[in-house]
Amino acid sequence: MNLKKLTTLTLSTIMILSTALFAFTGCEKNESGAENATPEASAVTTEIPEKEVAKENWNETAKIIILSGQSNMAGASYKAYLRNNESLDKEEKKQLIGAGFPNIQIMFSTGSADAPEDQWHTSNGRFVKVVAGQGAASTKTHFGPELGLADYLDEKYPGEKFYIVKHALGGSFIDEYLGSPLPDRCDSYAALTKIMDLAIPAVEADSGLKAEVVAFCWMQGESDAFHENYANFYAGKLDRLVTKIRTDYAEYAPERGIAFIDATINNSGIWPCHETVNNAKIQYQTNSKLNYLIYTNEAGLTCANEPEGTPDTAHYDSMSQLKLGHLFGEKLSEHLELTFEKD
């Protein structure tokens, strides 16, 4: 077995098959899903009141973007396919794979929800420049949407500094961001809080400005789409999570508020209840003009081509992952243009 297939098998085992095992085990026992499946949890109740606020001065704050979710946010796309892609010119490849984006920095912790923290791939609590290889695999062979996001922001806002904070674990259920992890798995909200506690003072020290959390970007839902016991209550849980983020980081929110930028999950056929989860995402988007949604399937993102011969249909192909980051950037830019006044 060659290295590429071995790596693929390892990622699939860590990020996909464990998800299926935990999802169906929980549903068969009617435990994890049923415990949280309350009528209150199924209703989306939080609406963000719209308010007219003056735009803030762009130069007075340092902008933090949170990326969170499961494996398609953690990063399971192969950077080798970027290197070999003929649609990318030499200079693009050099920046994406080698030079990176010095003005756009990232602090990250990624891995698998059923692996201990000491096995995650992290930036060791430091901000580093964004470059391909900051995905879930500690081999630095994979990347997530942070790369496309940085590419978009670098072109849209040349020379401007942004700080990305990414915590995402393959196979995560949304419950694990709500303090209800399955046995022997990570409390992802606690882990996200931990990295944010490091990031905020680091951003302020580096920039000399007040840190502002401008957006919470979310790429998750595949695990919950394995069974209706999870999928049917996704809407209420999503509401609880976003409300928690906006409440816990209210001190660092722009006057207009923290944007929530979500993305639908793919319809490749792996996730039986993908329509239920995606409908919940669509429903939640309508609660506020601070909510944005990326329609990944309509955008043509694919999971069918890589690795060649043994495609990983749970995770986005490399160019689709790059495009996903661009789409997050487009939605973020909409929010920034409404929030800040640039000179």
Image (cartoon, rainbow, N blue to C red):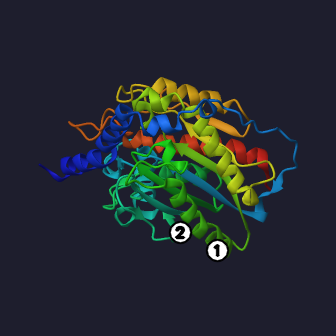
Q: Which mark is residue 306?
A: none
**Gap between marks 2 and 1 measured at Cα:** 10 Å
Give the residue at x 41% y 41%: 319
Residue at mark 2: 127
- The amino acid type, in three-letter code, at marker 1 is Asp
Of 290 and 272, the residue lying toward us: 272
Residue at mark 1: 206
- The amino acid type, in three-letter code, at marker 2 is Phe
In-image side of 33 versus 60 (left or right): left
285 w.r.t. 128: above or below: above
Give the residue at x 47% y 52%: 168
* Dot 2 alpha-carbon crowd within 10 angstroms: few under 14, some 14 to 19, many 20 or more: many
User: Contact, CB < 8 Å: mark 2 with mark 1?
Assistant: yes
Residue 154 image-quadrant placement: bottom right
Q: Is residue 131 visible?
A: no
In-image side of 104 versus 157 (left or right): left
Q: Which of marks 2 and 1 is nearer the N terminus?
A: 2
Residue 190 image-quadrant placement: bottom right
